[in-house]
Image (cartoon, rainbow, N blue to C red):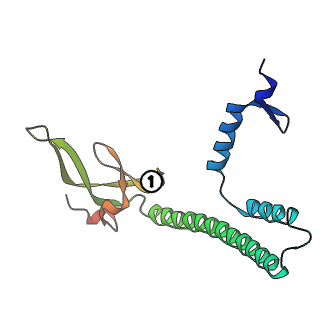
Amino acid sequence: MANSLNTITVDGVTYNSEAYAATQTTKATNQDLGKDAFLQLLVTQLRYQDPLEPQDNSQFIAQLAQFSALEQMTNVSSGVEDLSKVVGNIDTSVLVGQLSSMIGRKIDWVEEINSADADGNPVTTPKQMTGTVDGVTIAEGVPRVVVRTDTDVYQVDIANIGRVYADDTQVEA
């Protein structure tokens, strides 16, 4: 049993002095000074002000204005983050729709072949490839087309596509 002189009870939880100090350090490093902390400081300041010399009204109004501005900036920041996610989703959806129109068409692309030279040093060699688009996928957040050749299936980054053929008759062997 812990010595009662070395314990502290906070919100119904009893800590020994080392554990409580660790939780306070963690709270101090993990908590941003946000609008709740600002309001708490303001209320504490009002609670402990000298009743014979109260705070000047203009200072109090200035602090309230700062609090209001902080809250508005927080709301704007949150709204911009949400809007950014929506725009990103729309961009991806439009791109996938455009890439879907390539299904069934032949394309040329550059595939990078990784190998090693005689000394074991890595060598990357570009190889021109031709295949038929079978589908569209999003892998790791990146839209790609799924391309079938005579021998294999590839996921091709759209940046590597060199040519999209209008129909199969234009493909040169």
- Give x and y (percent) for residue 155: 37, 50
Q: Residue furthest right?
A: 51
Q: Residue furthest front?
A: 52
Q: Residue at x 57, y 63 (%)?
A: 89
Which element carries disc 1, helix, strand or loop? strand
Q: Would you place residue 95 above or below residue 145 in this image?
A: below
Q: Residue at x 68, y 38 (%)?
A: 21
Image-based side of 80 in relation to 124, left or right: right
Q: Residue at x 52, y 63 (%)?
A: 92
Circle 1: residue type: Gly
Q: Would you place residue 70 above or below residue 112 in this image?
A: below
- Give x and y (percent) for residue 59: 79, 78
CA neighbours of label 1 inside 10 A, class few (<14), some (14 to 19), many (20+): some
Residue at which label 1 appears = 135
Residue toward you, 87 or 154: 87
Residue toward you, 73 or 81: 73
Q: Residue furthest bottom?
A: 58
Q: Would you place residue 23 above or below residue 51 in this image?
A: above
Which quadrant of the figure contains the N terminus? top right
